[in-house]
Amino acid sequence: MHSLPPMTKGHVVTDVFAVPDSFPRPSPISTLPGSVTKFVVEQYEGKFYPAGGTPPQLHADWCYCEDLAQQFKEASLDTKAGKRAHMREADILDLYLLRLLETNWGTPAQMRWVIQRAASLLGWQAPPNSLLEPEN
């Protein structure tokens, strides 16, 4: 995976760990062993974040998912130009989403974001399944 530059406004770095608002964040509610729902957080630079949601962790996840979205953009174009030329664009992305959800490459919400992002990069309509809330 290649390294992506920090998000910028003009040429001024705004935050080295910036992540788009649309990128899913982890929930602080967890199912740790026990009978009571737990509130699980991590501390980073004096602040508390949901487990797995510190700025560096979230940024790394976003970089990974952005790279996947770029790959799926290219794969989708190849697929549409080839053996799936007869299919609607959203259906092609939906097939990729189903496969992505089986990979455990990220959370279901992250994989849905990957497909939504690929659709955006392509100028295609996102498949309805990518817009659904993931099941817990």
Image (cartoon, grey):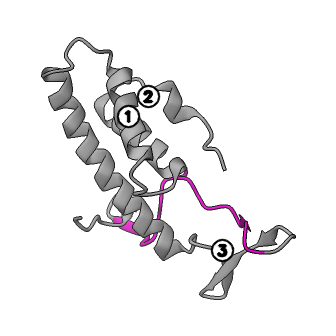
Q: In whole angstroms, how far apart are the C-alphas of marks 3 and 1?
A: 29 Å
- Residue at (41% x, 69% y) in the render: 60
Q: Is residue 60 magenta?
A: no
* Residue 57 x, y percent position in the rendering: 48, 73
- Secondary-structure class at tag 3: strand
* Residue 112 x, y percent position in the rendering: 48, 42
Residue occupied by mark 2: 126
Q: Is residue 22 magenta?
A: yes
Mark 1: amino acid: Ser
Q: Where 14 falls versus 116 (above or below)? A: below
> Which residue of the protein is positioned furthest toward the right in this rendering?
36
Q: Earlier in the sequence, mark 2 or mark 1?
A: 1
* Residue 7 x, y percent position in the rendering: 39, 61
**Label 1: how many Cα within 10 Å (few below 14, some 14–19, many 20+):** some
* Residue 16 x, y percent position in the rendering: 42, 72
Q: Where 76 falls versus 11 (above or below)? A: above
- Residue 116: quadrant of the picture: top left
Which one is in front, 45 or 88? 88
* Magenta stretch prevailing secondary structure: loop
Q: In whole angstroms, how far apart are the C-alphas of marks 2 and 1?
A: 8 Å
- Residue 125: quadrant of the picture: top left
- Secondary-structure class at tag 1: helix
Mark 3: amino acid: Tyr
Residue occupied by mark 3: 49
Mark 2: amino acid: Ala
Q: In whole angstroms, how far apart are the C-alphas of marks 3 and 2?
A: 30 Å
15 sits to left or right of 50:
left
Q: Which residues make up the magenta segment?
A: 12-33
- Residue at (19% x, 16% y) in the render: 85
Residue occupied by mark 1: 120
